Image: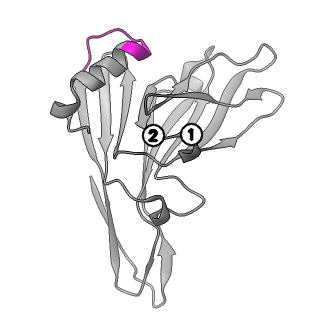
Amino acid sequence: LQVRATNIRKEDVAWDLWFNTRVASNTNVYVPVANTADIRQQVMTSETIDPLTFSLNDGIFALDFLPPTQEKAMRKGKLMIQPSQGWIASFSGKQLFIIQFPLQPQSAIHPEQGQVELYNEYNPENLQAGIMELEVHAPYKKLAPKEFMIAEETWTLVEYKGAATRNAQLEFLRAHASELGLR
């Protein structure tokens, strides 16, 4: 997918382009991340909402789908991530969905964003009521009139016959990284 945006105003404009791909709320998502300092969390809690939880092991970020605490109905929040490589992998049922994109330095991304952002509403009692958003941000740029910017990402969909566990999914990613174009 490629998007091109041109400034049609008569004055400069500063903006970024981003893709927002929605998948099921309980989709297992993996993002390569160097360290926890590259992850910021926007916590959204209330009397009925717990924050999201996540793990970072061996350079791979993963959401933890823990049930909310007893008095809460769901988990909800947003994570802004500076990835160490230009991809997101997500497993749902018998499918692996990969989004690849040009990796950008953190300095190119708007300071309130992450190059990868994950928004999740997770209610284990009603999965259809929730959502997972996989966002990829392009560089934040100032465009003069008639200047343009381009953002792009590549999607790959692969049949997955393995177990629906984190270990099995990560093993599959590592075993097939070269053929999938992952580094």
The image quarter containing residue 150 is bottom left
Q: Is residue 112 left or right of residue 146?
A: right
**Extreme-left residue of the structure:** 179
Magenta run includes residue 158: no
Left of 28 or right of it: where is 150? Answer: left
**Which quarter of the figure has residue 167?**
top left
Residue 34 x/y as whole percent: 46, 41
Residue 33 image label: 2
Tell me which colouring the rendered structure shows.
one colour
**Is most of the magenta stretch helix, strand or loop?**
loop
Q: Position of residue 72 (x, y in %)?
A: 77, 21
Give, as a three-letter code, the residue at label 2.
Answer: Val
Q: Secondary structure at mark 2?
A: loop
Residue at x 53%, y 64% (from the top left corner): 110
Q: Name the amino acid type tagged 1.
A: Thr
| In the rendered image, the vertical position of residue 24 relative to residue 16, given as above or below | above
Q: Which residue is mark 1?
A: 36
